[in-house]
Image (tube, grey):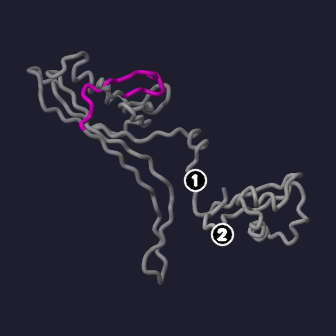
């Protein structure tokens, strides 16, 4: 099989489309992801209440190896170091570091280069680096529009609001949302409806989660 070479592609800014080919594929890489939670102490309880605040961005970490003696291709190690560390610089068009995509075979990771650690292990007679390892950390980059189009905002309360149309009634809405017309009572109770036949087009209904007879929790 042909060896797939990893590369870093600049996604936006003055260098958009530029590709930095990795001299040697990393021996390993690691993914990390975390969530932020708020801990609230409540008197009388044995442990604090834990409340979800937000999700944190994933990080991709790896070491990139550079060596002029193993691969003397141009550019040399100092130039390659400068090329990669320049991704930390503020782009003149974006007024922020450019987002990049790390690509290696099936791996596609859109990110910003968050941190680069440099360890030089071999030098030329003039003192310039001839062999180095770059410890790179990429933080996931998801533009605002992509997050709005595909939000990850599901929580325990998935209550919806539905407006009654001219061809609608509470039974049809229950069937559409829960696949069970008997669940109209759940909507009526949540919406404080005494007479479901008295609904008019334009009225708003609350459609809360419901655990049906099959044990599944709606809505769809």
Which residue in the rendered view is the most extreme toward the bottom? 44
Q: Nearer the viewer, residue 107 or 54?
A: 107
Q: Nearer the viewer, residue 35 or 169?
A: 169
Q: Which residue is mark 2?
A: 213
> Is residue 24 magenta-colored?
yes
- Ranked by sequence position, the earlier of labels 1 and 2 is 1
Q: Nearer the viewer, residue 132 or 165?
A: 165
Callout 1: helix, strand or loop?
A: loop
The answer to whether residue 7 is above or below residue 198 is: above
Residue at 35%, 46% in the rendered image: 31
The answer to whether residue 56 is above or below residue 109 is: below
Residue at 49%, 77% in the rendered image: 42
Which quarter of the rendered picture does the C terminus lie within? Answer: bottom right
- Answer with left or right where residue 73 lies relative to residue 6: left
Disc 1 vs disc 2: Cβ atoms closer than 8 Å? no
Tell me residue 50's x, y (percent). 47, 68
The segment highlighted magenta reads 8-27
The answer to whether residue 19 is above or below residue 195 is: above
Tell me residue 126's x, y (percent). 11, 20
Q: Which residue is mark 1?
A: 153
Callout 2: helix, strand or loop?
A: loop
Residue at 57%, 53% in the rendered image: 153
Which residue in the rendered view is the most extreme toward the top? 74
- Answer with left or right where residue 87 lies relative to residue 27: right
Which quarter of the rendered picture does the N terminus lie within? Answer: top left
> Is residue 198 magenta-colored?
no
Residue at 46%, 39% in the rendered image: 141
């Amino acid at each position: 099989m042909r060896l797939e070479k990893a590369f870093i592609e600049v996604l936006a800014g003055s260098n958009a489309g530029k590709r930095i080919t990795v001299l040697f594929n990393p021996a390993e890489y690691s993914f990390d992801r975390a969530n932020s939670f708020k801990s609230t102490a409540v008197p009388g309880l044995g442990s604090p209440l834990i409340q979800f605040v937000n999700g944190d961005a994933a990080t991709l970490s790896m070491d990139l190896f550079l060596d002029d003696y193993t691969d003397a291709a141009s550019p040399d190690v100092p130039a390659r170091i400068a090329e990669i560390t320049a991704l930390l610089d503020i782009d003149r068009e974006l007024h922020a570091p450019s987002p990049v995509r790390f690509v290696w075979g099936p791996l596609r990771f859109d990110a910003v280069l968050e941190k680069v650690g440099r360890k030089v292990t071999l030098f030329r007679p003039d003192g310039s680096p001839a062999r180095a390892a770059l410890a790179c950390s990429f933080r996931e980059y998801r533009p605002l529009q992509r997050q709005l189009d595909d939000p990850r905002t599901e929580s325990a309360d998935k209550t919806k609001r539905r407006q009654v149309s001219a061809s609608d009634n509470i039974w049809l809405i229950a069937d559409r949302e829960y696949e069970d017309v008997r669940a109209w009572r759940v909507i009526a109770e949540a919406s404080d409806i005494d007479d479901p036949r008295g609904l008019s087009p334009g009225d708003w209904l609350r459609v809360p989660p419901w655990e049906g007879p099959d044990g599944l929790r709606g809505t769809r």
